[in-house]
Image: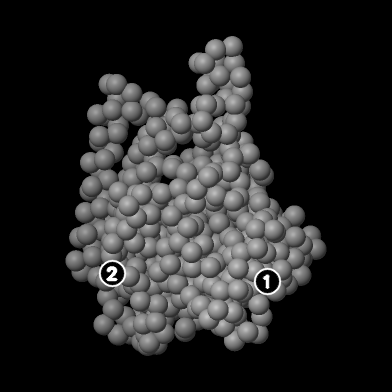
Amino acid sequence: MLTVYAARERLRRREVSAVELTRAFLERIHALNPRLNAYLTVADETALAMAGDADARMARGEDTPLLGVPIAIKDVLSTRDMRTTAGSKILANYTPSWDATAVARLRAMGAVFLGKLNCDEFAMGSSTENSAFGPTRNPWDETRVPGGSSGGSAAAVAADLCCAALGTDTGGSIRQPAALCGVTGLKNSYGRVSRYGLIAFASSLDTVGALTKDARDAAIMLRAMEGRDPLDSTSVEVEPIDVASLDQSRDSLRGLRVGVPAEYFGDGMQPDVAQRVREAIAHLQALGASVREVNLPRTHLGLPVYYIIAPAEASANLARFDGVKYGLRVQGRDLIATYMETRGAGFGAEVKRRIMLGTYALSAGYYDAYYIRAQKVRTLIKRDFEQAFSHVDIIAAPVSPTTAFPLGAKIDDPIQMYLADVFTLPVSLAGICGISIPCGFDRDGLPVGLQLIGPAFGEQRVLEVAHVFQQTTDFHLQKPKWHGQPRSS
Ligand code: GLN
C-alpha cells in the first residue's frame, strides 16, 4: 500500500524515480483493471510524460507534496488531455479543452495522472452500475458493488491502482464508496474546493474531494486543491489545512466532545455495521473523548428533500447536452428532433428519471409546492446540525446502513438504491464536511465505514480526529485478500 506521503518520501530519497513508479502503477492497472473496471481511460503516454517532467523538476531541486506522485481522476472532472465521459454515452468521445481547477492545481504541483475513473452516469447513483461503460467491481469481493458514484475512485485506491484519487460528493458519492471499499474519503465543506470544470450535477450540493489511503493523505490532497478560485464564485478562501500539525497530534483525544445522533442507528441498519460503528465510538472515548447523544430530528427528511433539489438542479444543468455543443449528436429531421434523439440515445435510465423528476418539481404550479418547500426544509436540516455543534465538536455516525451489496441487488429498485445514502445526504444538504474512515469488517469480511462529521470548514479538526483514530487502529491498513495478485474467482 503506497500512500501519497510514502511515495513522496521514496521519490525524495531517490529510491525510485517518478517514471519507475508510474510504470509500476500502469503495469498493475493493466493486470487488474480488466476485472475491476475502475479505470475508463488509462493514459499511459500522458502519465509517463508527466512523470518524466516530474523527474526533471526534482533534478532541479523542486519539492512539492505531490511532485511525481501517481494519482487518478473521476471521469466527471475535466482534463484537457484526457477524454472526460462523466460515465455517459453522450460524452463518450468528449475531451475538454481545459482542466477543472482542482485538476489544474494538482497538475501544477507535479502530480502524475494515470487516467480517468469510472462512475455512475453524471454522478447519479450509489453503486457505479449506472455507468454507460459497465459497473466497477469491489476489490474486496468482485461480485459486489464498490458503492457510488465515485466507485471507480474507491476501487482504484483500495486495489492500489493509484496513490490517491479525485472524486466528487453531491449526496454521499465520496463517503459511501470509501466506506464500501475500505478507504478514506473526505467530503469537503461546500465552497472549499472550486467546482470549475466539474461536469455539474446539482450545483448547490456538488463538492470535489479525494479518496485516499489515510487521513494524512486526505489532508495533503485537500491542501493542494482548496481555496478561492475566480472561476467559481461560490468558492471561498479559508484557513489552509495544516498538514504538519497532524503529525504533532497526539494519541489522545482528551477534551474532544463527540456527539452520537440517535437517528443514525434506527431500523434498516445491518446489525454488524451498527456494532462496528459503536465500537469505533467506544475507541474514541478510550482515547479521552467525551461522548454524548445529540439529536438531528430532521434526518428522515434528508432523502425526500435531496430528491427534489438534486434532480431539479440536474434537470437544468443537463439541458446543455443537446447535440449542439458537446459530445454525441443524433441528427433528427429538425432541431427539436435532433435534441430529442440525441438525449434519448445519449442518456441512461437513471439520468432520464432524474431529468423528469426535476423538470416536474420546477414546473409552473409545482415550484412552490416542491422546490421552495424543499429549500425551506433544507434550512431546517442545516439548523439541526448547527444546534448539535453548539454542544459537540464532532459527530460520529455510520456512513451507510449496509456494507457492499451484490451487483444487481438494487438496480431495479431506485428507492432501495436511494436509501443507501440516508446517512450522507443531510451533511451534503447542510454544506458541512464529513470523512469516511475504515472502522472494521462485517461477518463476510467486508469493510465498514465510520463517518466523522464537522461543521462548515471544520476539516482540520475532522482530519485530526481521523488521523488519531488511524494512528491507534489498523483497519485502514488491511487489504483485500488477493492484494498483490488477482484472486481467482
Ligand atoms: N447517490 C446519490 C445520488 O444518486 C449521491 C450521488 C452523489 O453524491 N454524486 O444522487
Screen quadrant of the C terminus: bottom right
Q: Nearer the viewer, mark 2 or mark 1?
A: 1
**In which quarter of the view is residue 457 placed?**
bottom left
Relative depth, front residue between 32 and 403: 32
Q: Residues within 10 Å of mark 2 (few under 14, many from 20)?
A: few
What residue sits 42% from the left and 35% below the top? Answer: 317
51 lies left or right of 485? left
Q: Amino acid at mark 1?
A: Val
Is 239 rendered above or below residue 209? Answer: below
Q: Which mark is residue 19?
A: 1
- Label 1 SS: helix
**In which quarter of the view is residue 386 placed?**
bottom left
Residue 130 image position (x, y, % from top left): 58, 42
Is 304 rendered above or below residue 181? Answer: above
How does the figure colour the protein chain or chains?
one colour
Q: Which residue is mark 2?
A: 239
Residue 340 image position (x, y, % from top left): 54, 20
Report whether residue 197 is seen.
yes
Screen quadrant of the N terminus: bottom right
439 lies left or right of 160? left
Give the farthest residue toward the front.
60
Q: Amino acid at mark 2?
A: Glu
Spatial separation of the CA atoms under disc 2 and disc 1: 34 Å
Is 312 rendered above or below residue 380? Answer: above
What residue sits 25% from the left and 53% below the top? Answer: 382
What residue sits 49% from the left and 57% below the top? Answer: 103
